[in-house]
Amino acid sequence: MRITNEQNDIASVLVSEEEIRARVAEIGAALTEEYQDKMPLVVCVLKGASFFYTDLCRAMKCHLFMDFIAVSSYGAEARSSGVVRIIKDLDTSITGRHVIIVEDIIDSGLTLKHLTELLSSRKPLSIKTVSLLDKQARHDPELAADVTGFNIPDEFVVGYGLDYASFYRNLPYIGVLKREAYEN
Ligand code: PRP
């Protein structure tokens, strides 16, 4: 096991704790307004979205339900085939309900696209997608989430839920990983 201080592997902070807090509060306020009387089911896509999800739910000042889904991480070829394999499904039915899907990052955009298609087939009243981060340069504009926290450059980012080899998720900010941290 490598003994390291995670902070030493970070080249720069891309989005600070303060910036995250402020943006989460903004998005939470907008969703509060929109969903005041709708009792939405807010869905966390495990594991990357976990910190954003819990902070966002706390920033929503309305009745809501929480549920969690985990999908498989396929290689690019399998992802583009249009398949999302459910590792852990939602505990509750979404038919006739307002659903908000919460993601940490849109990279190729295919995970969110396929997940949205899958959940749409269950006949919810509505689906809104929210992603903390978006690497716009990596995908077709139409694959962006309905709500984006921050558009970011195509850098190797970790922290606030995002990992590299399961590490760095617990960093409180979004940082750019040093090249030597993933090339060695
Ligand atoms: C990451 C992220 C998104 C997806 C984005 O999940 O959380 O779900 O990849 O990539 P895409 O836009 O190219 O589809 P990952 O499979 O790494 O799992 P994790 O959330 O458990 O880290």
Image (cartoon, grey):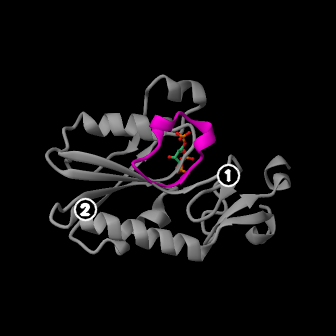
Magenta segment: 131-147
Percent x, y for residue 16? 63, 71
For residue 161, side relative to residue 65 (left or right): right
Mark on residue 67? none
Amino acid type shown at disc 2: Glu
Q: Is residue 89 above or below residue 160?
A: above
> Observer-nearest residue: 24 or 172?
24
Element under disc 2: helix
Percent x, y for residue 91? 26, 52
Q: Splitting the image into 4 quarters, where does residue 113 fall?
A: top left
Q: Name the residue: 68% across, 46% down.
A: 154
- The yes-or-no answer for disc 1 within 8 Å of ligand 1 is no
Q: Which residue is mark 2?
A: 34
Q: Name the residue: 36% across, 68% down.
A: 28
Q: Is residue 141 above or below residue 14?
A: above
Percent x, y for residue 35? 23, 62
Q: Residue 42 colored magenta?
A: no
For residue 64, side relative to residue 156 (left or right): left
Q: Which residue is mark 1?
A: 165
Task: Tell me the quarter of the image containing the N terminus.
Answer: bottom right
Q: Crowding at label 1, few (<14), some or many (≥20) Cα neighbours within 10 Å? A: few
- Asked if one can make out residue 120 in the rendered structure from this viewpoint, the answer is yes
Q: Crowding at label 2, few (<14), some or many (≥20) Cα neighbours within 10 Å? A: few
Percent x, y for residue 9? 79, 64
Q: Residue 142 colored magenta?
A: yes
Whole-angstrom CA distance, mark 1 to mark 2, is: 37 Å
Amino acid type shown at disc 1: Ala
Element under disc 1: loop
Q: Splitting the image into 4 quarters, where does residue 40 fall?
A: bottom left
Mark nearest the camera among 1 and 2 is 2
